[in-house]
Amino acid sequence: MPNNKPKLVLGSQSPRRRDLLKQIGITPDVIHAADLDESVRPRELPAPYVLRVAKEKNAAIAEKFPDAFVITGDTTVAVGRRILGKAANEAEAKEMLRLLSGRAHKIITAVVVRAPNGKVGHRTTTSRVKVKRLSEKELDNFIATGEWEDCAGAYKFQGNFAQYILNAEGSITGIIGLPLHETSALLRGLGYDF
Protein backbone atom coordinates (compact mmCIF):
# COMPACT_ATOMS: atom_id res chain seq x y z
CA MET A 1 0.00 0.00 0.00
CA PRO A 2 1.57 3.35 -0.99
CA ASN A 3 2.27 5.94 1.67
CA ASN A 4 0.29 9.04 0.76
CA LYS A 5 1.39 10.97 3.83
CA PRO A 6 2.65 14.42 2.82
CA LYS A 7 6.36 15.02 3.19
CA LEU A 8 7.72 17.15 5.99
CA VAL A 9 10.34 19.74 5.06
CA LEU A 10 12.54 21.33 7.72
CA GLY A 11 13.63 24.69 6.44
CA SER A 12 16.89 24.78 8.37
CA GLN A 13 20.38 23.31 8.20
CA SER A 14 20.61 23.50 11.99
CA PRO A 15 21.50 20.15 13.54
CA ARG A 16 19.96 21.46 16.77
CA ARG A 17 16.54 21.84 15.14
CA ARG A 18 16.80 18.33 13.64
CA ASP A 19 17.73 16.89 17.03
CA LEU A 20 14.84 18.69 18.71
CA LEU A 21 12.34 17.30 16.20
CA LYS A 22 13.77 13.83 16.75
CA GLN A 23 12.97 14.21 20.47
CA ILE A 24 9.26 14.24 19.60
CA GLY A 25 9.51 11.44 17.06
CA ILE A 26 9.73 13.50 13.89
CA THR A 27 12.33 12.95 11.19
CA PRO A 28 12.04 15.42 8.33
CA ASP A 29 11.81 13.91 4.85
CA VAL A 30 13.73 16.87 3.40
CA ILE A 31 16.15 19.41 4.87
CA HIS A 32 16.13 22.56 2.75
CA ALA A 33 17.21 25.95 4.04
CA ALA A 34 16.07 29.15 2.36
CA ASP A 35 18.76 31.53 1.19
CA LEU A 36 17.38 34.90 2.30
CA ASP A 37 18.65 38.29 3.33
CA GLU A 38 18.07 38.26 7.09
CA SER A 39 19.08 41.89 7.65
CA VAL A 40 17.23 43.79 10.32
CA ARG A 41 15.08 46.59 8.92
CA PRO A 42 15.32 50.11 10.37
CA ARG A 43 13.50 50.37 13.73
CA GLU A 44 12.46 46.69 13.58
CA LEU A 45 11.90 45.19 17.03
CA PRO A 46 13.19 41.71 17.96
CA ALA A 47 9.89 39.72 18.08
CA PRO A 48 8.47 41.10 14.81
CA TYR A 49 11.90 40.60 13.21
CA VAL A 50 12.17 36.87 14.00
CA LEU A 51 8.56 36.24 12.97
CA ARG A 52 9.07 38.08 9.66
CA VAL A 53 12.23 36.12 8.86
CA ALA A 54 10.63 32.76 9.78
CA LYS A 55 7.60 33.58 7.59
CA GLU A 56 9.79 34.65 4.66
CA LYS A 57 11.83 31.44 4.93
CA ASN A 58 8.62 29.40 5.01
CA ALA A 59 7.11 31.13 1.97
CA ALA A 60 10.32 30.65 -0.04
CA ILE A 61 10.52 26.93 0.79
CA ALA A 62 6.78 26.33 0.29
CA GLU A 63 7.17 27.53 -3.32
CA LYS A 64 9.57 24.63 -3.93
CA PHE A 65 7.59 22.08 -1.87
CA PRO A 66 3.91 23.06 -2.27
CA ASP A 67 2.56 19.61 -1.34
CA ALA A 68 4.54 19.28 1.89
CA PHE A 69 4.36 20.43 5.47
CA VAL A 70 7.06 23.08 5.91
CA ILE A 71 8.59 24.04 9.27
CA THR A 72 10.80 27.10 9.55
CA GLY A 73 12.13 28.99 12.51
CA ASP A 74 14.29 31.90 13.43
CA THR A 75 15.98 32.77 16.71
CA THR A 76 17.53 35.98 17.90
CA VAL A 77 19.12 37.29 21.05
CA ALA A 78 17.85 40.67 22.20
CA VAL A 79 19.25 43.13 24.70
CA GLY A 80 16.47 45.63 25.10
CA ARG A 81 15.52 46.64 21.56
CA ARG A 82 18.93 45.66 20.19
CA ILE A 83 19.02 42.50 18.06
CA LEU A 84 22.16 40.37 18.24
CA GLY A 85 22.43 38.19 15.17
CA LYS A 86 25.34 35.95 14.20
CA ALA A 87 28.81 37.40 14.73
CA ALA A 88 30.85 37.88 11.57
CA ASN A 89 34.20 37.39 13.31
CA GLU A 90 35.88 36.84 16.69
CA ALA A 91 36.01 40.55 17.54
CA GLU A 92 32.28 40.97 16.92
CA ALA A 93 31.53 37.78 18.91
CA LYS A 94 33.58 39.08 21.85
CA GLU A 95 31.76 42.42 21.73
CA MET A 96 28.37 40.65 21.81
CA LEU A 97 29.43 38.52 24.75
CA ARG A 98 30.68 41.60 26.62
CA LEU A 99 27.22 43.09 26.12
CA LEU A 100 25.59 39.94 27.60
CA SER A 101 28.08 39.70 30.49
CA GLY A 102 26.55 40.26 33.92
CA ARG A 103 23.03 40.87 32.69
CA ALA A 104 19.83 39.25 31.50
CA HIS A 105 18.77 39.12 27.87
CA LYS A 106 15.92 37.66 25.85
CA ILE A 107 16.02 34.83 23.37
CA ILE A 108 13.13 35.04 20.94
CA THR A 109 12.24 32.19 18.61
CA ALA A 110 9.50 32.15 15.99
CA VAL A 111 8.27 28.94 14.38
CA VAL A 112 6.10 28.85 11.26
CA VAL A 113 4.35 25.75 9.91
CA ARG A 114 2.65 25.57 6.52
CA ALA A 115 0.35 22.70 5.56
CA PRO A 116 0.00 21.32 2.01
CA ASN A 117 -3.43 22.99 1.79
CA GLY A 118 -1.74 26.39 2.20
CA LYS A 119 -2.84 27.06 5.77
CA VAL A 120 -0.12 28.63 7.90
CA GLY A 121 0.29 28.84 11.65
CA HIS A 122 2.96 30.50 13.75
CA ARG A 123 4.04 30.99 17.34
CA THR A 124 6.74 33.06 19.01
CA THR A 125 8.39 32.29 22.34
CA THR A 126 10.34 34.72 24.48
CA SER A 127 12.69 33.40 27.15
CA ARG A 128 14.99 35.15 29.58
CA VAL A 129 18.61 34.14 30.20
CA LYS A 130 20.97 35.63 32.76
CA VAL A 131 24.73 35.45 32.21
CA LYS A 132 27.37 35.82 34.95
CA ARG A 133 29.89 38.63 34.70
CA LEU A 134 32.59 37.33 32.36
CA SER A 135 36.30 37.97 32.83
CA GLU A 136 38.57 38.65 29.86
CA LYS A 137 40.11 35.20 30.36
CA GLU A 138 36.67 33.56 30.24
CA LEU A 139 35.81 35.52 27.10
CA ASP A 140 39.09 34.53 25.43
CA ASN A 141 38.67 30.87 26.43
CA PHE A 142 35.15 30.74 25.07
CA ILE A 143 36.06 32.51 21.80
CA ALA A 144 38.84 29.93 21.34
CA THR A 145 36.26 27.10 21.33
CA GLY A 146 34.80 28.41 18.06
CA GLU A 147 31.28 27.76 19.39
CA TRP A 148 30.35 31.39 18.79
CA GLU A 149 30.21 30.78 15.03
CA ASP A 150 26.79 30.61 13.36
CA CYS A 151 24.94 31.36 16.62
CA ALA A 152 22.67 34.31 17.40
CA GLY A 153 24.28 36.30 20.21
CA ALA A 154 27.56 34.37 19.67
CA TYR A 155 26.73 31.38 21.87
CA LYS A 156 24.77 28.11 22.10
CA PHE A 157 22.74 27.60 25.25
CA GLN A 158 23.53 23.87 25.29
CA GLY A 159 27.24 24.21 24.53
CA ASN A 160 30.39 25.28 26.38
CA PHE A 161 28.80 28.63 27.24
CA ALA A 162 26.31 26.87 29.57
CA GLN A 163 28.89 27.17 32.36
CA TYR A 164 28.34 30.95 32.34
CA ILE A 165 24.53 30.91 32.45
CA LEU A 166 23.14 31.72 35.89
CA ASN A 167 19.51 30.95 35.08
CA ALA A 168 16.96 30.69 32.31
CA GLU A 169 13.19 31.14 32.26
CA GLY A 170 10.85 30.19 29.45
CA SER A 171 10.99 27.65 26.66
CA ILE A 172 14.31 25.80 26.87
CA THR A 173 13.72 24.20 23.45
CA GLY A 174 12.87 27.68 22.13
CA ILE A 175 16.20 28.92 23.49
CA ILE A 176 17.95 26.07 21.68
CA GLY A 177 16.17 26.96 18.43
CA LEU A 178 12.75 25.29 18.05
CA PRO A 179 10.05 25.45 20.74
CA LEU A 180 8.73 21.89 20.76
CA HIS A 181 5.42 22.50 22.52
CA GLU A 182 4.46 25.19 20.03
CA THR A 183 5.82 23.25 17.03
CA SER A 184 3.94 20.04 17.86
CA ALA A 185 0.73 22.00 18.54
CA LEU A 186 1.02 23.77 15.17
CA LEU A 187 1.70 20.52 13.30
CA ARG A 188 -1.23 18.71 14.93
CA GLY A 189 -3.51 21.71 14.44
CA LEU A 190 -2.70 21.76 10.74
CA GLY A 191 -3.27 18.02 10.36
CA TYR A 192 0.21 16.49 10.46
CA ASP A 193 -0.05 13.00 11.91
CA PHE A 194 2.81 11.84 14.15
Image: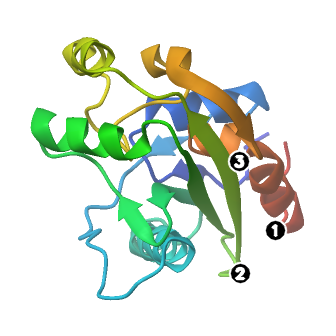
Q: Is residue 144 above or below residue 10?
A: above
In front: 147, or 177?
A: 147
Can residue 70 be seen from the camera position used here? no
Residue appearing at x 70%, y 59% in the figure: 125
Real-space CA distance between mark 1 and mark 2, rounded to the nearest whole angstrom: 7 Å
Q: Is residue 108 above or below residue 14?
A: below
Tag of residue 190? 1
Q: How many marks?
A: 3
Q: Position of residue 52 (x, y in %)?
A: 48, 78
Q: Nearer the viewer, mark 2 or mark 3?
A: 3
Based on the displayed image, in which of its 4 quarters is residue 180 positioned? top right
In front: 50, or 170?
A: 170
Q: Quadrant of the N terminus?
A: top right
Tag of residue 179? 3
Q: Is residue 188 left or right of residue 3?
A: right
Q: Which residue is mark 2?
A: 119
Kind of residue at badge 1? Leu
- Which badge, 2 or 3, comes first in the chain's sequence? 2
Can residue 178 be seen from the camera position used here? yes
Q: Position of residue 39 (x, y in %)?
A: 26, 72
In front: 103, or 190?
A: 103
Q: How is the image coloured?
A: rainbow
User: Are discs 1 and 2 less than 8 Å apart at CB?
Assistant: yes
Kind of residue at badge 2? Lys
- Which badge, 1 or 2, comes first in the chain's sequence? 2
Based on the displayed image, in which of its 4 quarters is residue 109 positioned? bottom right
Helix, strand or loop at disc 3? Answer: loop
Q: Position of residue 59 (x, y in %)?
A: 46, 77
